[in-house]
Image (spheres, rainbow, N blue to C red):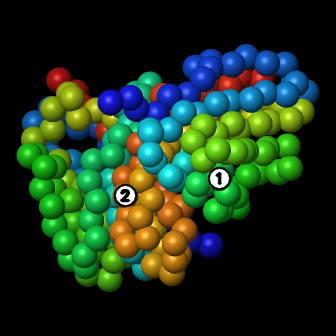
Amino acid sequence: GQQVMQIPQYQHVQEGEDFTTYCNSSTTLSNIQWYKQRPGGHPVFLIQLVKSGEVKKQKRLTFQFGEAKKNSSLHITATQTTDVGTYFCAGNGKNAGNNRKLIWGLGTSLAVNP
Amino acid sequence: GAGVSQTPSNKVTEKGKYVELRCDPISGHTALYWYRQSLGQGPEFLIYFQGTGAADDSGLPNDRFFAVRPEGSVSTLKIQRTERGDSAMYLCASSPHSTSGYNEQFFGPGTRLTVL
């Protein structure tokens, strides 16, 4: 079946350092969404990428969707303690038709030392 | 406006009992999703409704799990003969459905189920 892998599973950084998490799908995706889950909270949508090679920025966060639409990355510049949480990627399969079930990665947990 | 709500926020039950978990989606959202999340894991898909019908129930682990959405709004996840392994956070999300694109999912705060 379709799988989405995320690496690393955990990342511990000093405040001010950069952070990157990578998402790799076993199959071509129609889109990729990124969510953030704070400790004790629920996933909150960050962004969606749809086009091959697309790059989007949100302040210190940069999101990329690969040319083959099978991988994606999230890069955070100069991390802050407010960035702490688990970052999930999730996508819809290319041949899913009208089925809107998302295939989720296992997440990357980010810890930031002040 | 109001977000997705879930009740109860916590449910403690004994092994073998029956439980119902409720989800109130954002008004007007036609798509509704149930997930299960264990500590340190990602959301595990259970079932997805488009309107009143289950569009994809491939994630339900076995026939002890059942979900309904009779009027296309509120949904109830029902678990029969609960087992200790059912203990987890049960998350509900809703989304405005689109046949031409993909929309974000809005999550509720979850129901923490503990089976003793």
Q: Is residue B39 above or below residue B73?
A: above
Residue wearing tag 2: B103
Q: Is residue A83 above or below residue B100?
A: above
Q: Which mark is residue B52?
A: 1
Q: Relative to B79, is B39 on the left or the right?
A: left
Mark linked to residue A94 = none
Look at the numbered disc 2 and give the secondary structure of its residue. Answer: loop
Of labels 2 and 1, earlier in sequence is 1
Q: Do the dots labelled 2 and 1 sit on one chain?
A: yes
Label 1 crowding class (10 Å Cα cut-off): few <14, some 14-19, many 20+? some
Q: Please name the residue shown 50% across and 28% down the image.
A: B5
Residue at position x 64%, y 62% in the image: B55
Amino acid type, label 2: Asn
Tell us which disc is closer to us: 2 or 1.
1
Mark 2, other Cα within 10 Å: few <14 / some 14–19 / many ≥20: some
Q: Compared to A63, does B92 lie above or below? A: above
Where is residue A105 shown, x and y percent of the image?
47, 56
